[in-house]
Image (cartoon, grey):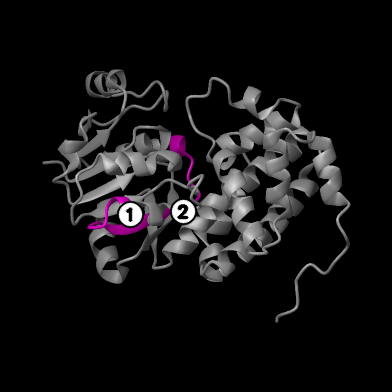
């Protein structure tokens, strides 16, 4: 029986499977598409989601979720908006579920751990998040991540040896909420940074947006019970810096297209991979407004995605906001 399972054969799921298999560990990866299962098993490649990567012989693929029922640990790497449906098809059991999707469920406002608690009540939950480009992990470049364990140190002691590899270094946290919020909010802010690039506004503007975006992340996270030290770490600020700085980020690339004048529909048309920030932005803005949390950059991204204003006008509105202190005084 395989030592570990990966649910989801997109770029990130495939990269994680390859990393886990790099020491000879048997890994079973789930893919919805029968043709992708056949390709992984026959050719050791995933040309649809991670072209150029060569998978180890110990990675095997299946489209049958029942085959994963007996595995003691599963990394769940399906897009955030599909997590509930996929977990509903997986037989529930007392296993470790490591949630790797970064987003907030549209329509409900639930973080991924809340979705998983409802869909898999017997599972022990953890969250894996941090600054990770899939193609770098797949070829074994050094990467550090946060592994936030709802079950505390006992769960960490089980999971860390399963996940850690010489080039993939997890760091312990018990702040699941902070890890999830950092991963979800940074996707939206990466869209904004792509817009800055698309408009040719320069590096000063991007650095300012990252800093002010981090302030929004912090406000939202603290209001929902996250810890500041979590959001200043790998799964918050670290992930924010990475995804706001490279076209390897799907969310940054979406923003780049918006800044260059494309509509959201045009920018997303024909894409096989998911820019989670496009789904997260509206629900994040709604949650923030409901709780009285000021997130003007997130609101600006929502306007761009909805097509209610061109990128230049949205940026002009941000620059015209009232002058204020950078840090609010403590209450």
Disc on res. 118: 1
Image x and y of residue 151, in percent:
30, 67
From the viewer's side, name the closer residue of 243 and 294: 294
**Could you tell me which quadrant the N terminus lies in?**
top left
From the viewer's side, name the closer residue of 222 and 284: 284
Disc on res. 110: 2
Residue 138 visible at all = yes
Query: Compared to 70, does 158 lie above or below?
Result: below
Image x and y of residue 233, in percent:
53, 62
Image x and y of residue 105, in percent:
48, 47
From the viewer's side, name the closer residue of 78 and 115: 115
Based on the picture, tell me whether residue 56 belongs to the magenta stretch. no
Can you tell which quarter of the image residue 123 is in? bottom left
**Could you tell me which quadrant the C terminus lies in?**
bottom right
Disc on res. 300: none
Image x and y of residue 303, in percent:
72, 40
Look at the image and give the residue range highlighted in magenta: 119-136
Q: Residue at x 21, y 45 (%)?
A: 4
Q: Is 318 positioned to the left or the right of 123 in the image? A: right
């Amino acid at each position: 029986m395989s030592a570990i399972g990966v649910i989801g054969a997109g770029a990130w799921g495939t990269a994680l499977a390859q990393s886990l298999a790099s020491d000879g560990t048997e890994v079973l990866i789930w893919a919805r598409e029968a043709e992708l299962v056949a390709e992984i098993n026959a050719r050791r490649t995933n040309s649809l989601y991670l072209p150029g990567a060569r998978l180890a012989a110990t990675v095997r693929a299946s489209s049958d979720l029942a085959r994963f029922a007996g595995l003691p640990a599963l990394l769940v790497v399906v897009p955030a908006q599909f997590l509930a449906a996929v977990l509903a098809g997986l037989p529930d059991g007392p296993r470790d579920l490591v949630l790797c999707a970064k987003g907030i469920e549209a329509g409900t406002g639930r973080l991924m751990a809340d979705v998983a608690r409802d869909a898999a009540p017997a599972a022990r939950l953890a969250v894996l998040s941090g600054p990770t480009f899939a193609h770098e992990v797949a070829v074994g470049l050094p990467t550090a991540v946060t592994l936030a364990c709802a079950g505390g140190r006992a769960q960490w002691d089980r999971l860390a040896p399963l996940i850690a590899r010489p080039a993939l270094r997890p760091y312990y946290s018990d702040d699941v909420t902070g890890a999830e919020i950092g991963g979800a909010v940074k996707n939206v802010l990466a869209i904004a940074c792509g817009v800055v690039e698309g408009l040719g506004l320069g590096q000063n503007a991007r650095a300012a947006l990252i800093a002010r975006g981090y302030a929004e992340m912090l406000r939202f996270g603290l209001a929902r019970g996250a810890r500041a030290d979590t959001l200043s770490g790998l799964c918050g600020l670290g992930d924010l810096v990475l995804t706001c700085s490279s076209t390897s980020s799907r969310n940054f690339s979406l923003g780049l297209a918006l800044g260059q004048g494309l509509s959201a529909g045009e920018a997303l048309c024909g894409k096989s991979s998911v820019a989670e920030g496009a789904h997260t932005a509206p629900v994040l803005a709604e949650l923030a407004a409901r709780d009285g949390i000021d997130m003007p950059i997130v609101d600006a991204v929502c306007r761009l995605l909805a097509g209610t204003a061109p990128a230049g006008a949205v940026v002009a509105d941000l620059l015209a906001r009232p002058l204020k202190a950078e840090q609010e005084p403590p209450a």
